[in-house]
Amino acid sequence: MPVIGFLSPGPPGAGGPLLDGFRLGLNETGYSEGQTVTIEYHWVEANDRLTVMAGDLVGRKVDLIVAITDPVARTSQTVSSTIPIVFFIGGDPVTDGLVASLARPGANLTGVTVFGDELNPKRLELVSELVPEAKVIALLTNPNNPSRAVFSQSADMQEAARSRGVQLRIVKATSESEIDAAFATLAELQARALIVDTDLFLFGQRAQIGALAASHSVPAIYYRREFVAAGGLISYGPSFAEAYRQAGIYAGRVLGGTKPSDLPVLQPAKFELIINTKAAKALGLEVPSTLLARADEVIE
């Protein structure tokens, strides 16, 4: 029975329902966990353990490594140039040096990217449209996520802020207490709206973040539908469940004998705008009809 080494940041089971999407993709290629394939899950809760845990999978001689997030993919690439790797990332795999090109990855890696780094400027535009009086907008980010620290200060983000005539302020959090502290500073910064950055830790704290956004009366835009389904205001991004399913399909195809170099890197075909009108009313916001018309889903 082939063995997949699943390497992901976060506490055990951090993927939640997304893992169901991955397993669904595997099933579509004829593999069923526990019956025709074994999955060894390695959850990385400390960055300094990443290389060790990736090396452990190599030592176990797994047939395939599934690498979740950009740092995990880069580390997996450094520890093995022969074991096939299927990644799920948010950045540009070409710029990061993971693949030679999207169409022809080369080497032993391929996978799925949701290009999360490119979507925060769009989220800033959307929340500005929803809250036009906001002249200061904060970005909540996790500084322990190395792929986000640089991007939060990128030229694209700053240009998006300038084009809207707003100031962008960065607030950071790496723990529950720091999330509480970050929200407490929003009033001092005079931030009237918030962007929640793409990050697994922040996703895991979505209930806490949603409750704080409501209690502080801060309109917030998120990167995944799950935030809005849990009572958040608005989200814009790809379907992560579908992206995980695509990663599962690629994992199955590689186990079936297809070389990663022959599988082009997949990108989202559709981006979803989700709006929760009940949350908007609670915040005293009138959602513009033009924004509602563009929404893929309105939660009432």
Image (tube, helix red, strand yellow):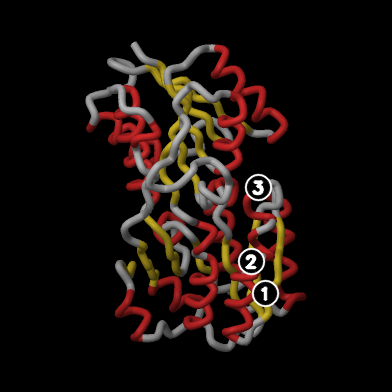
**From what the image shows, is residue 267 above or below residue 296?**
above
Residue type at the position of mark 3 = Asn
The residue depicted at 50 percent of the width and 13 percent of the height is 61
| Whether label 3 touches label 1, CB < 8 Å | no
**Which image quadrant is residue 51 in?**
top right
> Residue 129 at what x, y percent from top left?
48, 83
Q: Residue at x 55, y 46 (%)?
A: 200
Image quarter hosting the N terminus: top left
Figure check: 232 above or below 98: below
User: For residue 168, which numbered disc appears in the image?
Assistant: 1
Q: What distance separates the C-alpha of mark 1 from that of mark 2?
A: 7 Å
Q: Nearer the viewer, residue 144 or 71?
A: 71
Q: Earlier in the sequence, mark 3 or mark 1?
A: 3
Q: Pointer 3: what residue?
A: 145
Numbered label attached to residue 27: none
Going by the numbered disc 1, the residue's amino acid type is: Leu
Q: Which image quarter: residue 171?
A: bottom right
Q: Nearer the viewer, residue 158 or 181?
A: 158
Seen in the picture, residue 230 relative to 192 is either above or below; the reply is: above
CB contact under 8 Å: marks 1 and 2 = yes
In-image side of 59 versus 297 (left or right): right
Residue 131 % position (x, y): 53, 83
Q: Position of residue 5 (x, y in %)?
A: 47, 23
Residue type for callout 2: Leu
Residue indicated by mark 2: 139
- Mark 3 secondary-structure assignment: loop
- N-terminal of the pair, mark 1 or mark 2, is 2
Would residue 93 be seen by someone viewing this image from the given angle? yes
Q: Please state the horizontal and vertical placement of residue 281, each as a whole percent of the image.
A: 44, 78
The answer to whether one can see residue 16 in this image is no
Secondary structure type for disc 2: strand
